[in-house]
Every structure is written in C-alpha cells, then in structure tokens.
Amino acid sequence: MLPHQLIDYTSGRASTYFDGEEGKVVHVDFTRPYTPWLRARCLEAAGAAGIDLADGGVYGAANGPRLETAAEIDRMDRDGATIVGMTGMPEAALAREVDLPYAAICVVVNHAAGRGDSEHAISMQALVKTLDEGIAKVRTLLEHLAPIAVPPPSPAEGSR
C-alpha cells in the first residue's frame, strides 16, 4: 500500500531536528505528508514491476513494539486510519524538515487486532511469513524505482 495521509498516534519519540535548543525552530507544512511526485514514481515502478500497489490510504503510526489492542484499532478505524504501522513517524516529518522527498511503501502483513483472521489473536508466525514475502516485492519495486526516482525540474530550472 502507498498511503497518501497519516495520523500520528506516537509519543515519546524525538520528532524534530530543530527543538529550539540552538535558537532554531522550524515549522513545516505537513498538509500532504508524502511527496506527490515520488508517490507517482512509486506507482509507476510498481506497474513496471507487475506489483499490485494499492494507491492511497491513511497510515496510523503507533508506538510499538507491541501490537495494538482491538480497542485501539477500533479508535483508529473511527479516526479514518486504513493501515497501522510503527515506522511512519517521525520519519515523514523529519524528512519534510530537511526537504527530503519521502513516500511510504507499506507491506500489509496481517489483519489488525479484532479484525478478520486476527479477531481473537494475531499469528506471529503468519505475520513474519507474509512480511518476508512482502519485502521481496518491495525490493523488486525499489529496483524499478531507482532509475526513475528523480524530482521533476523546479519552475525556475524549467525556464533555463
């Protein structure tokens, strides 16, 4: 899945390079947390690689390392999260602070707690097996992405 939005449920993580200790605080526009042109290139690379990559979703970033309770998943679902993971924040915000293009390619490894085949419990064995299979697809996608992952020219560069 290639999310287009995120909700940050994390706490206690360093979330900025600019905490004001050296007199600098940086505010960034986070309306669209993922870089649009890079998301487009990810979709293009997935198509070229023959990989089914779902376009769009709302990433709910949780602390981990424990998995969520069924009640936490219910809350995230009500909030509009369509995928839950532990590595989406603060990475996206940190990338934005230093103007680094960023997109998240997510491997869906299980139904969330209380859903589908995870209604009563999540099988760690099945989770690891699915993750291993998904990571192989991500590697293939990245091999197709690397040659095309160049930013479009800025308006100033296009006029030269």
Image (cartoon, rainbow, N blue to C red):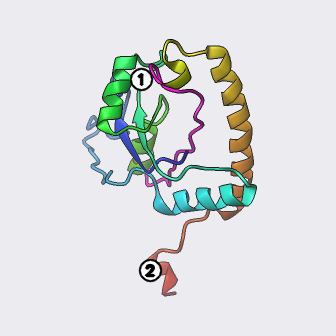
The number of numbered discs placed on residues in the rendered structure image is: 2
Task: Name the outermost residue toward the top.
Answer: 120
Residue at 52%, 87% in the rendered image:
160
Residue placed most toward the observer, 91 or 118: 118
Task: Decide whether residue 99 is among the magenta residues.
Answer: yes
Please tell me whether mark 1 or mark 2 is closer to you in this view: 1
Q: Position of residue 28 (x, y in %)?
A: 31, 51
In the picture, the disc for residue 63 is: 1
| Amino acid beneath label 1 | Asn
Quadrant placement of the N terminus: top right
In the picture, the disc for residue 35 is: none
| Amino acid beneath label 2 | Ala
Residue placed most toward the observer, 15 or 85: 85
Q: Indicate whether 91 appears above or below 63.
A: below
Q: Where, by quadrant of the figure, is residue 74 drawn?
A: top left
Q: Which residue is mark 2?
A: 156
| Callout 2 crowding tier (Cα within 10 Å): few <14, some 14–19, many ≥20 | few
Q: Compare marks 1 and 2 and give the one earlier in the sequence.
A: 1
Residue placed most toward the observer, 9 or 84: 84
Q: Is residue 66 left or right of residue 76?
A: right
Q: Is residue 109 left or right of residue 88?
A: right
Q: Indicate whether 5 appears above or below 90.
A: below
Circle 2 — which element?
helix
Q: Position of residue 20 (x, y in %)?
A: 26, 38
Residue placed most toward the observer, 160 or 20: 160
Residue at 71%, 24% in the rendered image:
129
- Numbered range of the magenta stretch: 98-115
Q: Position of residue 50 (x, y in %)?
A: 73, 55
Circle 1 — which element?
loop
Q: Indicate whether 110 appears above or below 67.
A: below
Residue at 44%, 55% in the rendered image:
99
Q: Position of residue 29 (x, y in %)?
A: 30, 54
